Image: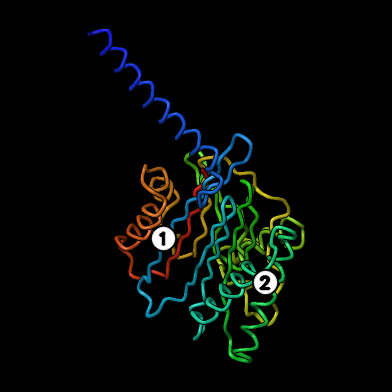
Amino acid sequence: MQEIFLNQYTCIVLLILFIIIFAALNFIMNMEDIPFFKKKGDVIDFIGIGMAQYIGTREKQDDSFDSQRDGNMAFAIVADGIGGFMDGDMASRIAVDTFMENYRHGNVRDNINYFFNSSAMSANEKIRRKFQDTPCGTTVVAALVVNKKLYFMSVGDSIIAVFRNGRLIPVNTKQNVENWLEEQYIYGKISREQALGSKKNRRLMNYVGYDGFKAPEVSDKPVELRTGDKVLLYSDGVELLTQIEMENILSRKISVQQKAEEIMRKIMNKRAKSKDNSTVIILDIR
């Protein structure tokens, strides 16, 4: 009698194990159909997105932002309307809407650089046409991640950076007087004294909506990303935090959305008389 019971018990256990294994195999085979997952050989990519914003001590929010995720591809954009102009908030919104519309209705993968350049030119024209002789403009940083490759575009002084192994590394160059003077010195066009004379001049040399608009900075080749990397796009208001403070937050074992919110919370708690608008988007590569 005991032997019969043991045989029945063994059969039940084996049946349960078979069901579990079958369900697990079925899940793995159909994982490509799950939103935000993409099977690529033996690698499964996941891109998490965290976004947060803080008005600071300003009367209105001039930053605009948006993102979209499609399987193992994600696009993100942050535009910082120039606060010295009356309608910086409208300029940043026009820029973001223009890029997002082109992204959603075009085959971006076929020519990524064309997408970046044409979208920047189109946004510039729309802002100029709307405000005509009234000064108005915005900085723009945009990032496209495809199969763990980062393509980016930058106009103005907002930031794109990659967080890897505990270090936050900027990948774009700010288009301001300070960096322009440094470049002129490197190419031997001005003296060291001339370059240092206006070292802290952060006036923008280029922005979307500028009547002398120049081409945006576009990545010559993609940045190769690794699992665990985080791509950040943020307006210059976030620079109230030190690099170490940013790295400490990004190293914490919390969700990517919580990291974005913690960056804003840290800025809110900073003791500073003046706080600019702050916006951050974090793409978490898994």
Q: Quadrant for the N terminus, please.
A: top left
Label 2 vs label 1, nearer the camera: 2
Where is residue 147 drawn, in percent x and y? Answer: 63, 47
Residue 12 versus residue 138 in the image, above or below: above
Locate residue 108, reporting x and y percent: 69, 62
Residue drawn where x is 67% and y is 71% of the image: 119
Dot 1 crowding, Cα within 10 Å, few <14, some 14–19, many 20+:
some
In the figure, 148 relative to 64: above or below?
Answer: above
Mark number, residue 240 = 1
In this picture, residue 97 sits left or right of residue 252: right
Residue 111 lies, with reference to residue 134, above or below; the image says above
- Residue 200 is situated, as x and y percent measured from the top left of the image, at 55, 64
Under mark 2, the amino acid is: Ser
Alpha carbons under labels 2 and 1: distance apart:
30 Å
Quadrant of residue 43 within the rendered picture: top right
Q: Secondary structure at mark 1?
A: helix
User: What's the residue at 63%, 91% (across, down)?
Assistant: 132
| Front residue (pair 266, 152) | 152
Q: Determine which residue is flagged by label 2.
A: 119
- Which residue is more in the foreground, 98 or 90? 98
Q: Report if the CB atoms under discs 2 and 1 are less than 8 Å apart.
A: no
Q: Is residue 207 above or below residue 263?
A: below
